[in-house]
Image (cartoon, rainbow, N blue to C red):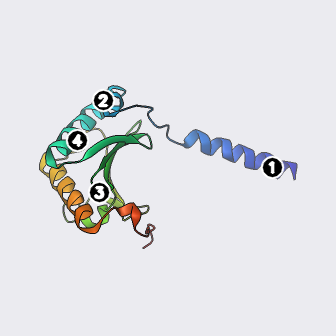
Amino acid sequence: MALLSASLQATRRDRARDVKKSIAAVNADAYIASLDGWRKAFVEAIRTAVLEAAPVQETVKWGHLVFLSNGPALLVRAEDNRVLFGFWRGRRLLDIEPRLKPGGKYEMATLELVQGTALERSTVTGLVRAAVSLNASLGDPTALPSKTSGT
């Protein structure tokens, strides 16, 4: 029993080390100020395009940038080696950006950006406008029964 308990504790410690630490920021400006290099450049460019593309409310939630329009519509999350650009209804946006990878609840899909990834501004604005339009017509995605990645 003690061996099993020690093994479980070690596994929990290993998982805790693997969890990505969220950036503690009080607002979007502080979030971006905490970044550097290519990640900062990506996040700044995406943020500018998002804010120009549609009327959204910007906040820091769950340790990353979240843009709201009748509920959460999209997010930008900077990690050590990548930037994630995700959409609550992203599975419906694959015709705009086929590199979106479905996963999670609420029809979530995310584009993984690494240093050197090409991403056109027109693609960003198209995704944002479509995400905002979907929330306008369908409502807050988190208020609906959630769907898992298998459905």
Residue sitting nearer the eye, 143 or 151: 143
Residue 46 is labelled as 4
Q: Residue 9's quadrant in the figure? A: top right
* Image x and y of residue 111, in percent: 31, 52
Marks 4/1: CA–CA distance: 46 Å
Name the secondary structure under disc 4.
helix
Mark 3 / mark 1, whichever is N-terminal: 1
* Image x and y of residue 128, in percent: 21, 53
Q: Which residue is mark 1?
A: 5
Marks 2/1: CA–CA distance: 44 Å
Q: Which residue is mark 2?
A: 29
Residue sitting nearer the eye, 46 or 141: 141
Q: Are marks 3 and 1 in contact (CB under 8 Å)?
A: no
Marks 4/3: CA–CA distance: 20 Å
Residue 70 is labelled as 3
Marks 3/1: CA–CA distance: 46 Å
Residue at image position (15%, 55%) is 126
Name the secondary structure under disc 3.
loop
Q: Residues within 10 Å of mark 1 (few under 14, many from 20)?
A: few
Which mark's residue is nearer the viewer, 4 or 3? Answer: 3
Give the amino acid type for the residue marked by disc 1 in the picture.
Answer: Ser
Mark 2 / mark 3, whichever is N-terminal: 2
Q: Residues within 10 Å of mark 3 (few under 14, many from 20)?
A: some
Q: Is residue 77 visible?
A: no
Marks 2/4: CA–CA distance: 13 Å
Task: Tell me: residue 61, above or below residue 109.
Answer: above
Q: Residues within 10 Å of mark 2 (few under 14, many from 20)?
A: few
